[in-house]
């Protein structure tokens, strides 16, 4: 390796390290856990007007949206944040003021990403193959 190649390599390494550190400072902390605070009744009961693909608008609670998303993921055996974009389902997106943690495992309390400080909805559903799908909504409060 010549001197220029070594210098270029060091600059790229320093640049990548700096960008990763900057990204960590600007991004909310996320980790995976099966535990966490249980959502309060007031948080679970917050209502939203939710539009479905067919154009129908329903008023639903955070808990009802989470349960519908968990039920759909279990029925389709598809753990995806974008389950609402599938053509064969009509399920709403997660509430805009929340982030979503999803998980799949052998118990209803299987681990999900923890993407905020306060859990505001928690729902699970068992699929036909015996796996549990869990959806939790989080907010930073």
Image (cartoon, rainbow, N blue to C red):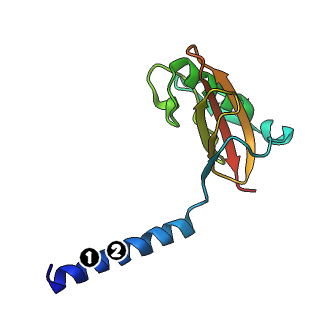
Would residue 2 appear left or right of 128 to someone viewing this image? left
- On screen, 117 above or below 100? below
- Tell me the element at label 2: helix
Identify the image quadrant of the N terminus.
bottom left
- On screen, 11 above or below 20? below
Q: Position of residue 117 (x, y in %)?
A: 72, 54
- On screen, 5 above or below 35? below
- On screen, 3 above or below 49? below
Looking at this view, is 130 or 61 the one in front?
Answer: 130
Q: Position of residue 86 (x, y in %)?
A: 45, 26
Q: Position of residue 8 (x, y in %)?
A: 24, 79
Q: Position of residue 53 (x, y in %)?
A: 52, 26
- The answer, for residue 61, to whether it is visible in the render is no
**C-alpha gap between disc 2 and disc 1:** 6 Å
- The answer, for residue 128, to whether it is visible in the render is yes
Would residue 1 appear left or right of 84 to someone viewing this image? left
Q: Residue at x 59, y 35 (%)?
A: 103
Identify the image quadrant of the C terminus.
bottom right
Looking at this view, is 8 or 38 the one in front?
Answer: 8
Q: In the current view of this chain or complex, which residue is farthest to the top?
A: 128
Q: Please name the residue that numbered disc 1 is placed on.
A: 9
């Amino acid at each position: 390796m010549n001197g220029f190649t070594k210098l270029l390599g060091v600059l790229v390494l320093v640049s990548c390290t700096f960008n990763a550190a900057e990204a960590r400072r600007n991004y909310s902390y996320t980790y995976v856990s099966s535990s966490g605070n249980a959502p309060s009744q007031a948080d679970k009961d917050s209502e939203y007007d939710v539009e479905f693909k067919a154009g129908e608008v329903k008023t639903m609670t955070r808990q009802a949206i989470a349960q519908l998303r968990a039920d759909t993921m279990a029925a389709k055996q598809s753990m995806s944040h974008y389950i609402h974009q599938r053509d064969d389902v009509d399920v709403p997106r997660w509430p805009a003021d929340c982030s979503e943690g999803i998980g799949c495992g052998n118990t209803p309390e299987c681990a999900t990403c923890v993407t905020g400080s306060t859990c505001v909805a928690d729902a699970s559903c068992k699929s036909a193959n015996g796996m549990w799908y869990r959806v939790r909504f989080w907010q930073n409060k």
